[in-house]
Amino acid sequence: MGIVLFDGVAYGMLLFLMAVGLSITMGLMNFVNLAHGSFAVVGGYTAAVLMNQAGLNYWGALAAAFVAAALLGAVLELVFYRRLYRAHPLDQVLLSIGVVFVSIAALTYFFGPTMLPFHLPPALQGQFGIAGLELSRYRAFLIVCGVAVLVLLMLAMGRTRYGAMVRAAVDNQRVAGGTGIHVQRLFFLTFSLGCGLAGLGGALSLGMLGLEPSFPLKYMVYFLIVVCVGGAGTITGPFIAALLVGIVDVAGKYYLPEAGAFLIYVFMIAMLLLRPNGIVPKKGIA
């Protein structure tokens, strides 16, 4: 039971890293971005290619994954997304789902339909013992990364001028603009940050989930569950929801493998019935 819980928490941390950016951008921009997983897969492929072909070390590859996904997000925000902020949600869905299929086709064309080879650095290989359990070093590292990102985001949103502007824009964009906040620039920076976090999560997931071109479609529902159950526009909400989803999914696959993903959808329905506004309802970014 302890190992199942540990693995579930590690899986939940990956989901949090990849979904928290979607939560922030949905809360700030009210944009239905179904292509969030595409930025995760771009980060993962960037890390894998740089390690396999350029000889970059693992830690440098993680940084490069964040930068690559953030830059791609910045370009797409400038060229496409900002044109549809006030458009009908259906237009937003069509654009973002189009980005998903374009990314799948492009990655399949350049890298093939299968997963890229990937090797963890020696420091993250193997196991360590604690309380009589043999736990994975890599999964422990994922948990540390998830907690670190949570703490950094909470500090950034709660203690910095940028965070104050984001909170103001989430509460009321018109009033925020009237106080001198450049809302369009804030959208651009926040969208890029969210995409970068997705890319970092995609690179970190190489050792657990593996990445293939269809990854954005395969995990789209999981990202949406984390954001909807946790509460769009919050940070702690998706963190709690991701942990619950990770534990339920891993435990279900371990104890009831014949149920598949059925338990996740039961969990989602139950949580939305109990907390229709999310575990942490939006009251600014918190």
Image (cartoon, rainbow, N blue to C red):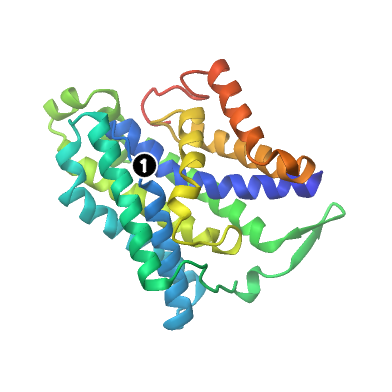
**Left or right of 154: which side holds 119?**
right
Q: Looking at the figure, which quarter contains the N terminus? A: top right
Residue 54 to residue 89: above or below: below
Q: Residue at x 46, y 19 (%)?
A: 277
Q: Residue at x 33, y 64 (%)?
A: 106
Q: Does residue 126 appear anywhere in the picture?
A: yes
Residue closer to the observer: 211 or 150? 211
| Residue at position x 46%, y 56% in the image | 214
Pointer 1: what residue?
Answer: 34
Viewport quadrant of the C terminus: top left
Q: Residues within 10 Å of mark 1 (few under 14, many from 20)?
A: many
Is 76 placed above or below 32 here? below
Q: Nearer the viewer, residue 94 or 177?
A: 94
Task: Name the spot of residue 28 as percent of width and height, x first.
Answer: 29, 33
Corner quadrant of residue 123: bottom right
Q: Amino acid at mark 1?
A: Leu
Judge from the rendering whether residue 122 lies leftward or rightward of residue 114; answer left or right: right
